[in-house]
Amino acid sequence: MAAAISAKTLVLASQSPRRVELLRDAGFSFDIQVPDVEEAHDAALSPAELTLENARRKALRVAIDNPGAIVVGADTLVYVDGEPLAKPADMEEARAMLRRLSGRWHEVCTGVVLAQAPDVILADIPVITRVHFKPLDEDAITAYHQRCNPLDKAGGYGIQDAPDIILHEIDGSWSNVVGLPVERVIEALIAHGIAPLANSA
């Protein structure tokens, strides 16, 4: 018997091509709306608290324009030595970030919030994955940048881009490092009545 598909509208509060692809590959049908919000940059907040705060701002802002819909907001930050690395401002900063991550463990935290208008939080999901980079010399960094645009990515890298150059080991969710912990998001959406279309077969 085919599973029932919810009539609820799902909206992704992000234009990140990586989040869009992950959610689509998980079998969901959704609209996309980019939130116009000012993100928090409070160093006193933990990685989970800061990413959830920014995800909450994004989700609630988009929810206002989509009454009745379930909105997914997400925010990802890379942390090393307890310090967040946001998107690099230019290629030199991107190189500096890879030098700092070279040969070391760091953490990637994604906060995901499911919200409905006017201010209902249905779920908040913080996920942390530990990532260990290979030692990277200047030639390796150059080779990586020839295959990856680092300027739109927290920490100046995308784990899905040329992992053979940068990645030594990962402890936790791969999709979380890409930008959306899909396993946890699927569970939360199903719990609130939105099933992946793939389940309808």
Image (tube, rainbow, N blue to C red):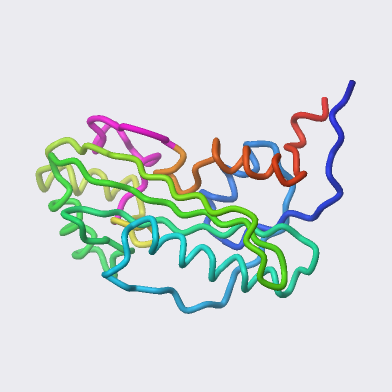
* Relative side of 92 to 40, left or right: left
Please determine whether, in this image, residue 21 is positioned above or below residue 80: above
Residue 17 covered by magenta stretch:
no
* Relative side of 158 to 57, left or right: left
Image x and y of residue 22, in percent = 57, 42
Going by the picture, which residue comes out furthest to the top?
1
Image x and y of residue 148, in percent = 35, 49
Please determine whether, in this image, residue 200 is positioned above or below residue 46: above
Image x and y of residue 28, in percent = 71, 42
Q: How many marks?
A: 0
- 36 or 98, which is in the foreground? 36
* Relative side of 131 to 117, left or right: left
Magenta-tinted stretch: 156-174
Tell me the residue at 46%/49% (across/down). 179
Residue 77: quarter of image: bottom left
Going by the picture, which residue comes out furthest to the right?
1
Tell me the residue at 46%/59% (across/down). 75
Can you say which quadrant of the picture contains the C terminus? top right
Image x and y of residue 31, in percent = 72, 58
Residue 115: quarter of image: bottom right
Tell me the residue at 57%/61% (across/down). 14
Tell me the residue at 55%/39% (across/down). 184
Can you say which quadrant of the picture contains the N terminus? top right
* Relative side of 25 to 2, left or right: left
Residue 173 covered by magenta stretch:
yes
